[in-house]
Image (tube, coloured by chain):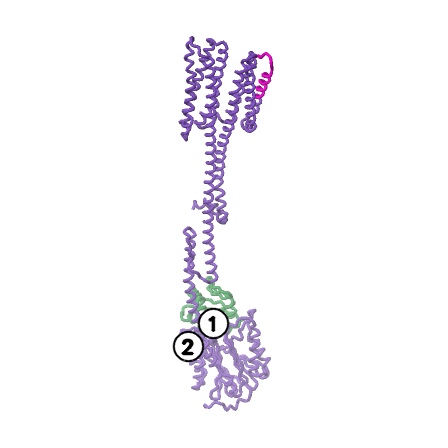
Chain colours: A purple, B green
């Protein structure tokens, strides 16, 4: 649980984002370091490339510089004759040519400086160099006596300045920092060794030139030459060793092939010259000085030749290096971009896959809601969502089963319902059939009778009857507890029992009700029913009414409108509740005059409720009866029913309603009955 | 013990050994009245002397309900050890008539109509 707590913020955040946002967020965070690394990598490679490019600029600068480095000393050498006016004039043309050449060299140099000067920061030094050259040119135009010492000083200054400029270029162009051994030693040759050799050769030339005038080599001159030659030999040895190192450390191993011959040739030529140093040790030996000068001139040219070859190779290697960097940058970028495309592709695939699944599920659930339970949802999904789909399918399958069950149950219910309706309908018809017919009632002489029964459900539990037999009329009114089928059946039983007893002419009220009670009681016991009923019986004969049994109060309304109420509490007991009720049975006798009427009803009328929960009440009933007392039984009945209906209004009807109005309409004392039995 | 419905409440006051009824009872048949009958029976078992049934605030009781009360009284009559007192109200129409019947079912039932 602790683990889950740690991830709670992440879970909360992720849950709030839609997939596109999730992807974007993660990608963004993830690619920040990658982007940074790529940037650093690319700029790193770029800076190395720029480093090398500067070296190439440096080499470009060195080329004209090298020409100046060759030509200026030649001019210096040529101007050693300035004291000799004749030879000076002979060489005037040649020297002018040389001067122009040097001018062109400086122009070339200026052009290069314009291009690369700001990278190499050479402006100042170049200017200084140009100034000195300008000075030399001025001196040369001066005719007349030349100050050789002064001249040489200026030339030396120029040569120093050029050296300083070259050295500076070597520094600022990163040439002296070259990281690869092969190019480094090439640079060492072109920037340092070869110019040094060239310079030393020139110094030797100078001495021999001087000695050539007298055709005599002094001891000190000899010593100087030997030293210089020794210097050249040492430098040459170093150069050779360095070249060997360069060849060995050339990754492509083709440098040796290209350069081994020129380098060897050069070292051989140098050896030839420097070998003469040994010869010079013999003071008696004097070489052919003019020939020596020629040799030195030759070797100078060979030095220049080697220089050009080496710097060309160097430039090639430098360019290859840059190309390598560029291709590395491109390759890295292509690789990363490819990866990004693949990632994006997979992300999109992921998203589309999820969306597909979600849409399908959404669709299927919509269909389910609308009631069309679909088949399983099939997807090629194999990830966690597949579990969701599985669960969904399980739910769908369960629903299909449940739906089937429900449909079956529903059908069963419908069948049941139809059956029950039929049963109720049958019983309701039976009940209706049992009730006294209008025709019957109208045939009873001397009495105006109107009956009304309205069950609360299809089948009611109220009972009333009017039985005409042997000149006597028996009225019954009762209320079975509850209503519905069982109550209705009990009511029919009571009706039959009463009719039976009347047929056998049972006149004793106590016995009558006792038998009814025992009959019903034992039937109810057998039926294991909880029902019982109130029952009042009224026997009418010749205007006399005997009331027995317990039910609601019986109401008599006299002709003059006076009302008499008869409590039946002490006249009986509920039927079917106790096995023996004889002790409770009593009777009351009443006389009826013409115009009097009595009312039988059940509590469905007096206890009818309106929306406010008030009961209709017996008082209200009596009011209506009194108001309509002069009218016919049917009219009185109608008035009461209307009034009760109005009172109930919108309220639900809780109980069955029964109402019987019996009016004495004529002298009934002479009753020649319609009945045949007597 | 307590039974509550939309319009009525029946509960046993242990201290006063009284089952109280309030409201209006219109349940449909003996099955629906069974829980109340059960409450009254177990209340009767818990009282040492007589159980008091207070109907003074029962505004209405339908025929099935009166039938249920009758059954209860018959049951109480059979268990001769128990005494029973029923308190009703004269102001409530159905009580005047029906409660008298209860006394007939059980002669030593004490009926008080206030």
Image quarter of the C terminus of chain A = bottom left
Is A149 in front, or is A649? A149
- Which x, y percent locates residue A606? 54, 75
User: Magenta residues, as a range?
Assistant: A128-147
Q: Secondary structure at mark 1?
A: helix
- Which x, y percent locates residue A585? 46, 79
Picture residue at 46% right of the left edge, 19% below the top: A298
| Image-quadrant location for residue A401 | bottom left
How many other residues sit within 10 Å of disc 1, few (<14), some (14-19) or many (≥20)?
many
Please name the residue that numbered disc 2 is placed on: A521
Q: Seen in the image, is B57 located left or right of residue A283?
A: right
- Which x, y percent locates residue A163? 52, 20
Distance Cα–Cα, label 1 vs label 2 = 17 Å
Can residue A132 be seen at all in this image of the molecule?
yes
Please name the residue that numbered disc 1 is placed on: B66
Q: Is residue A430 magenta?
A: no
- Secondary structure character of the magenta stretch overall: helix
Q: How many marks can you see?
A: 2
């Amino acid at each position: 649980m602790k683990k889950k707590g740690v991830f709670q913020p992440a879970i909360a955040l992720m849950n709030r984002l839609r997939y596109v946002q999730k992807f974007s967020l993660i990608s963004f965070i993830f690619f920040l370091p990658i982007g940074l690394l790529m940037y650093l990598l690319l700029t790193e490679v770029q800076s190395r490339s720029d480093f090398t490019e500067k070296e190439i600029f440096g080499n470009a600068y060195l080329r004209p510089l090298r020409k100046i480095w060759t030509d200026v000393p030649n001019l210096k050498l040529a101007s050693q004759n300035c004291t000799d006016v004749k030879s000076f004039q002979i060489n005037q043309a040649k020297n002018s040519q040389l001067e122009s050449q040097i001018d062109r060299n400086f122009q070339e140099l200026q052009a290069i400086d314009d291009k690369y000067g700001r990278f190499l920061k050479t402006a100042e030094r170049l200017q200084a160099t140009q100034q000195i050259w300008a000075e030399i040119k001025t001196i040369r135009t001066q005719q007349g006596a030349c100050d050789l010492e002064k001249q040489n000083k200026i030339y030396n200054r120029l040569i120093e300045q050029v050296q300083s400029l070259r050295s500076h270029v070597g520094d600022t162009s990163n040439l002296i920092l070259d990281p690869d051994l092969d190019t480094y030693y090439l640079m060492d040759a072109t920037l340092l060794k070869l110019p040094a050799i060239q310079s030393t050769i020139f110094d030797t030339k100078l001495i021999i030139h001087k000695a050539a005038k007298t055709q005599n080599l002094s001891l000190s001159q000899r010593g100087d030459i030997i030293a210089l030659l020794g210097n050249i030999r040492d430098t040459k040895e170093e150069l050779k060793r360095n070249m060997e190192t360069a060849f060995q450390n050339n990754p492509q191993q083709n440098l040796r092939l290209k350069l081994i011959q020129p380098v060897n040739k050069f070292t051989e030529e140098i050896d030839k010259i420097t070998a003469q140093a040994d010869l010079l040790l013999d003071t008696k030996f004097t070489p052919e000085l003019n020939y020596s000068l020629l040799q030195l001139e030759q070797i100078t040219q060979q030095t220049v030749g080697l220089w050009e070859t080496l710097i060309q190779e160097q430039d090639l290697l430098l360019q290859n290096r840059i190309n390598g960097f560029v291709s590395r940058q491109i390759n890295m970028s292509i690789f990363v971009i490819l990866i990004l495309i693949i990632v994006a592709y997979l992300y999109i695939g992921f998203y589309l896959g999820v969306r597909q699944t979600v849409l399908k599920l959404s669709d299927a659930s919509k269909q389910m809601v609308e009631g069309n339970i679909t088949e399983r949802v099939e997807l090629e999904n194999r990830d966690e969502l597949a579990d969701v789909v599985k669960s969904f399918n399980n739910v769908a399958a369960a629903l299909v089963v449940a739906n089937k069950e429900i449909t079956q149950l529903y059908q069963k219910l419908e069948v049941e319902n139809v059956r029950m309706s039929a049963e109720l309908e049958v019983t309701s018809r039976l009940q209706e059939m049992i009730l006294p017919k209008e025709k019957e009632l109208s045939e009873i002489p001397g009495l105006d009778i109107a009956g009304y029964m309205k069950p609360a459900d299809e089948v009611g539990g109220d009972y009333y009857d009017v039985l005409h037999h042997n000149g006597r009329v028996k009225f019954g009114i009762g209320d079975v507890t509850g209503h519905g089928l069982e109550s209705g059946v009990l009511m029919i039983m009571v009706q039959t029992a009463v009719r039976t007893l009347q047929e056998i002419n049972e006149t004793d009220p106590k016995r009558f009700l006792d038998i009814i009670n025992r009959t019903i009681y034992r039937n109810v016991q057998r039926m294991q029913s909880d029902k019982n009923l109130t029952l009042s019986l009224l026997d009418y004969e010749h205007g006399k009414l005997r009331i027995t049994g317990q039910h609601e109060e019986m109401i008599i309304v006299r002709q003059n409108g006076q009302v008499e109420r008869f409590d039946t509490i002490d006249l009986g007991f509920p039927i079917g509740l106790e096995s023996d009720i004889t002790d409770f049975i009593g009777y009351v006798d009443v006389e009826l005059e013409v115009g009097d009427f009595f009312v039988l009803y059940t509590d469905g009328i007096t206890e009818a409720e309106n929306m406010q929960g008030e009961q209709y009440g017996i008082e209200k009933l009596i009011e209506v009866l009194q108001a309509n007392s002069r009218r016919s039984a049917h009219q009185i009945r109608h008035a009461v029913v209307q009034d009760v209906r109005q009172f109930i209004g919108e309220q639900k009807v809780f109980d069955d309603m029964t109402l019987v109005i019996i009016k004495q309409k004529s002298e009934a004392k002479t009753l020649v009955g319609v009945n045949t039995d007597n | 013990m307590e039974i509550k419905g939309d319009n009525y409440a029946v509960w046993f006051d242990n201290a006063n050994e009284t089952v109280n009824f309030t409201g209006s009872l219109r349940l449909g048949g003996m099955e629906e009245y069974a829980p109340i009958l059960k409450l009254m029976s177990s209340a009767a078992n818990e009282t040492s002397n007589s159980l008091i049934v207070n109907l003074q605030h029962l505004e209405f009781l339908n025929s099935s309900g009166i039938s249920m009360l009758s059954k209860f009284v018959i049951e109480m009559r059979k268990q001769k050890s128990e005494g029973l007192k029923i308190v009703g109200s004269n102001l409530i129409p159905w009580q005047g008539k029906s409660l008298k019947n209860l006394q007939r079912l059980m002669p030593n039932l004490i009926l008080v109509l206030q």
